[in-house]
Image (cartoon, rainbow, N blue to C red):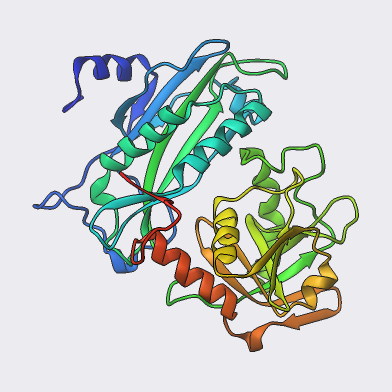
Amino acid sequence: MPGESPAESLKAESFPLALIGVRVLNRDGDSELDWDSLTFSFTQTDRMYMATCKQGEEWQSGFMQDFQNLSLSPAAGVINYGQGLFEGMKAQYAEDGNVVLFRPSDNARRSREGARRLGMPPVPEEMFLNAVKMTVKENIRWVPPIGKGALYVRPLLFGSGAILGVAPAPEFTFLVYVSPVGPYFKGGITPTSLRVSDEFHRAAPGGSGGVKAIGNYAPGMVPSKMAKKEGYSEIIYLDAVNHKYIEEVGAANFFCVKNGIISTPELTGTILPGVTRASVMELAESKGYEVREEKIDVDYALDADECFCVGTAAVISSIGTIEHGDRVVEYCGGEVGPVAMEMYDSLTAIQQRRVPDQFNWTVEV
């Protein structure tokens, strides 16, 4: 391939892939995207990273290549048994002109822990971080201008080898691709409307709810679609044992505020240990708030002063109303809650380096 070293070309050709990517440049070599119209959706970019590892061996050195389709055996472990996980990160321009990542080591660590739970070889942190940085660098023209969005980074780890029988795949693939995305909320943050589900549960104790496993997301599509069809933004999942403790909001972590105390569901293995979740907790404590990780009874949340959810995509989303059974509760008069707004402004200011990063969370690419 043009621009690759002989070694890279040989590696690329040895991996069964079908090239579909075509680079589209304007005269200045920049992206031709209309940044103001960018939505939170997939846009094919230029380059991707790939590495492989055979069961019981060490990871091979990865390489960059043009964005391509994958060619997999129908018996691949990820297709038949769902042996795979992913991470979600953002690279964006900071106020100082640098492109920065937000707490990438946390994603690397979560990926390693999840890999062990799913019987896959963990990707070493240095390899993970280098892969992410290289992929962002080789797609730098796709990073939106500051305030217009971000470059969403998607590391994937999955069983790519063929296997028949429920067991770890004989070979694994680690890859990283990126896509420019617009702000999750066009026109600013608006409070969401949620409904508590008494019918569906996201995860159970002893399962893989605490892992960003690919299989955790398909079961949530139907409940989410049902809620949106009825006019809600998303659903709130309760625990699968007692059916009364809040766990997650769709694929986001939950917070509520009552009498100045910020509470979030404790990590018991059934909810994802979100990077934004941890950041909000540390940030709130630094501002003097009391932050508690605890079981949150749905009735406690309904009586709270304010509720919000957090995640990589939306950063922080204020909750306007929650419906549970025959009860509907409105928070903050239907406006964005003050704590959610404070956390959003402070966190995004750190991510974009508009204020000093006292936590050393941002990493230059």
Question: Number of labelled discs?
Answer: 0
In the image, is residue 177 above or below residue 40?
Answer: above
Residue 237: name its quadrant: bottom right
On screen, residue 41 versus residue 113, left or right, reads: left
Q: In which quarter of the image is the C terminus?
A: top left
Q: Residue 207 at what x, y percent from top left?
A: 77, 37
Q: Is 91 positioned to the left or the right of 188 in the image?
A: left
What residue appears at the point 82 percent right and 67 percent down from the top-left corner? Answer: 298
Q: Can residue 183 be seen in this view?
A: no
Residue 177 lies in what quarter of the image?
top left
Asked if residue 310 shows in the view, the reply is yes
Q: Is residue 69 above or below residue 53?
A: below
Q: Which residue is drawn at 41% across and 27% down?
A: 127
Seen in the picture, residue 222 relative to 195 is either above or below; the reply is above
**Residue occupying the point 34% across, 61% down:** 353
**Where residue 83 sits: x, y (%)?**
63, 28
Kindly give the residue lying farthest to the left in the view shown.
27
Residue at the extreme top of the image, as rendered: 57
Quadrant location, the N terminus: top left
Instruction: Identify the residue shown where x is 45% and y is 54%.
Output: 359
Residue 18 drawn at (x, y percent): 35, 27
Q: Is residue 317 above or below residue 164?
A: below
Residue 285: x and y, percent? 59, 64
Residue 118 shown left or right of residue 275 in the figure: right
Q: Residue furthest right?
A: 242
